[in-house]
Image (spheres, grey):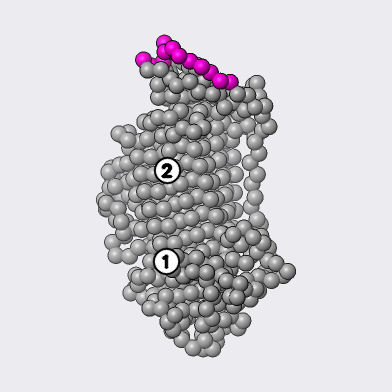
Amino acid sequence: MRNIEFHFFSKSHLSIFVLVFCSTIFTCCSKESITPITDPGNHEDFVKNIYVSALGNDSNTGTVNAPVKTIQKGLGLINPGDTVFVREGVYKEKISFNRSGNNNSYITLKAYPGEKATISGDGLSVNGDESLITLNAVSWITIEDLDICNFKTFNAWANVDGIVVKGASNHIIIRKNRVFNIENNATPEQGRSGHAIAIIGNTEIPITKVLVEGNEIFDCNTGYSENLTINGYVDGFEIRNNKVYNGENIGIVAAGGYSANSIPAYNYARNGIIADNEVFDMDGKKGPIPAYSEHNGAIGIYVDGARNIIVERNKVHDCGRGIGIVSETDHFPTQECIVRNNFVFNCSLAGISLGGYIGYTGGGTNNCYVVNNTIYENNRDLGYFDEVEGEIRLTENCSNNVIQNNIIYARPENNVCIHKYTSTGSNNQINYNLYYSTGTVRWIWNGTEYTNFDEWKSACDGDRSSMNEKNPLFVNTTIPDLHIQTSSPAKNAGMPFSTEINGQTDIDGQPRIVNNQISMGAQQ
C-alpha cells in the first residue's frame, strides 16, 4: 500500500491591479452597460485573462472592457496559463474544453471574484449522454467557484451529468463549485442515470492526477447512479473536503467492473484518497421516483470493485448505509483498501459494509483494513432480509481483512455490533475494539448469534484484547458529538500498526499515534 499525495503548484505571478472606470455604453456589447470591474490578473505578461458577461458579445475580444457573451466562446480564446473569468449571471449552455494547459500552466474557468456565475441546464435538451461541462482527453484544467445546476430529463435511458471528465485526461482540478439539481426523473423501468460529477476512465490510457476539492453537491436525483463518481481506468485521485447531501442513491463512489472501460485490466479505479468529506441525507427512497422502494440502500461513501483506496477522516451520517468496501460484480473484488478515522452514525442500515452481495456476486473484499473508526447507532431500520445488518457488516467472500481499534456503539433495540452472514471467506482478524450499547450487545458470526463475549471471541477467533460494555464516554450523544472525553476507556487503549495503516492524523487533524500509543475510535 502506498500513500497518494499530489501537489498542485501555482505559478508565481506579478500582481497587477487595473481599475477601470467606465460611464458609457460599449457599442460592441448589448444595449445595457457592463458594470466596470477590476482585472484580478495576477498573471505574467504572456498570460491573459478572458472575460465572459451575460451582457457581452461573442464578437468581442474578451478583454475586461469588451467581454464575450458565452463561456464556450471564451474557452476558444485561451492558451495554457490563461483564465476565463465568468461574471455574474446565468449561462444556459453546454460547454466543453477543446484545448489543454501544460506543465503547471493550468487553463482555468472560474467565477469572477465576489460574483455568482451559474451554468444552467434549464431548458436544454438531453439526448443520450449529456453534460453541462465536458472534459475529454484534456489536461491541466481547473474549474472553480461556479454554480452548475438545473440539468434535468425525463427521457428513457438518458444519462445526465453536471461535470464529466473522460478520455486520457490528467491534472484536473474541480474546486469550490456548487453542483445541484442534476436530475434524471425517468421511471426506473426506463433506466435512470445521472451524476453531479463523473470521472470516467474509458480508454487504454488512464485518467491521472485528479483533485475534486471543496465542492458542494446537493439536491440531485441520480437514479441508480451516484452523485460523485470515479469509475474505470482512473489511476491517482483525491476527493477532499466536499459536502454531498440530500441526494438520491450513492454519495461518493470509486468503482470497477462496470461498463466504463471495455478492457478488464483497466476497468477499475485505483490509487486514490477519499478524505475529509461530509456525506449525509443520501436517501434512495425519496425523490419523485424513488430508486429504492422498500429499503434505503443509498451508501454515503462506496468503494465497489476498486483497489488501493484510502477512506479517511470523513463524516458520514443519515444515509442508507455509511461506508461500503464492497463488490457488486464478479471478478472485481474490492481489495487493498483502508477505511480509517471516520465518524459514521445514524444511518438507516449498516455503518460499514464489506463483501459481495448475498446470492448476487462473488467478488468480495480482500486485504482491507477497517481501523480507528467511530461507528455510532446506525441500523435505524431492518435490512433486506428483515435482519439487523450490524454496525459492521460482512457478507460474501471477505478474506484477510483487519477490523481493529474501532469504537462500535450500537442502538439499544437494533444492537448488533458485527454481523458476518455466511461462512465464505477466511482469515479475518478482529481485535482491540470497544463495544457498547445501552441494550444488550450482540454479534452474529457465520449466521449464529452471540450475546456472551467469551463465546463471541471463540466464534470469531479474535477480539482477545477488545472491551465489551464499556461506555466510550462521548462528549455528547444527543447532537451527537462523537469525540471522547479524556477519561474515556478508549483513550490510548488501541494497538497501532503504522502510520501507513493508521494514518498520520485523526479526524481532527491531530497526530494519530502519540508516543507509540493510539486511542480506539477516530479521535486520538
For residue 170, which numbered disc appears in the image?
A: none
Tell me the residue that label 2 is attached to: 179
Which quarter of the rendering shows the C terminus? bottom right
Residue 181 position in % (x across, y down)? 36, 44
Q: Is residue 11 above or below residue 254?
A: above
* Placement of the N terminus among the 4 image quadrants: bottom right
Residue at the (47%, 54%) spot, across then down: 252
Left or right: 152 as drawn, with respect to 36: left
The correct choice, above or below, for 52 with respect to 309 in the image is above
Segment colored magenta: 18-31
Q: Which kind of residue does numbered mark 2 sit on?
A: Val
Question: x%, y% of residue 296?
Answer: 35, 63
* Front residue of 348 and 357: 348
Q: What's the distance in space between the residues labelled 1 and 2, CA to CA?
A: 25 Å
Q: Residue furthest right?
A: 515
Amino acid type, residue under disc 1 in the picture: Asn
Q: Is residue 417 magenta?
A: no
Q: Is residue 127 visible?
A: no
